[in-house]
Image: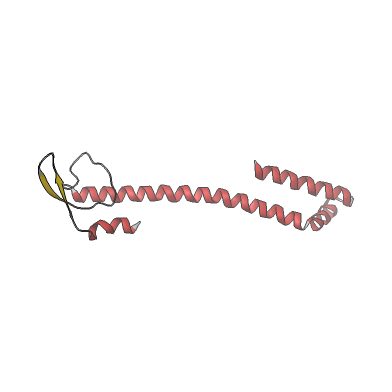
Amino acid sequence: MVVYFIHPLYTDEMVKFYASRNETVLVKALPLSSWFPFDEQKYYLESYLWHILDICVGAIFVTGTDIFTFSLIIFALGQIKILIYILSNFDEFVTKIQNQINCSQEEASFITLRECILKHKEIIR
């Protein structure tokens, strides 16, 4: 982002010829290519500051959107890893369920498998 700010300050002015006005002018570079309802060369400082504001707003928007998107992806991946861990250690979880609710191993296996299926459906949803 900083490169966009300082790049125009170190570039040389460009010579531009306007055939319609039969005029040659020196054009200073700006960070972005945009249109202004005023002469951006005459009000260069204002145009430059406006571009810096635009870059900051754009960077904040992109950063916020990326953080939100990555958090959704990471949350789903974390839930899948938890489910994989439970299925990898299925016997341990069956024993824990069996001790907690005092039931047979078959019932505890059924409950653990059912909870894994419900967890998987929740992740998909």
- The answer to which of 53 and 3 lies nearer the viewer is 3
Horizontally, is 3 left or right of 21 in the view?
right
Residue lying at the far bottom in this picture: please name it. 10
Residue 85 x %, y %:
72, 57
Q: Nearer the viewer, residue 102 or 90?
A: 90
Q: Position of residue 122 (x, y in %)?
A: 67, 43
Would you say 68 lies left or right of 97 here? left
Q: Residue at x 73, y 43 (%)?
A: 118
Residue 95 is situated, as x and y percent measured from the top left of the image, at 83, 56
Q: Position of 41 compared to 57: left or right?
A: left
Could you tell me which residue is drawn at 29 percent across and 51 percent down? 52
Q: Position of residue 73 (x, y in %)?
A: 57, 50
Residue furthest out toward the right: 104
Q: Is residue 65 left or right of residue 36?
A: right
In percent of the image, x 39 and y 51: which residue is there?
A: 59
Task: Check the picture and name the quadrant holding the N terminus.
Answer: bottom left
Q: How is the image coloured?
A: secondary structure
Counting labels gives 0
Which one is in front, 31 or 21?
21
Residue lying at the far left of the rendered structure: 22
In the rendered image, which quarter contains the C terminus?
top right
Task: Give the residue displayed 20% in from the left and 51% down from the top.
Answer: 45
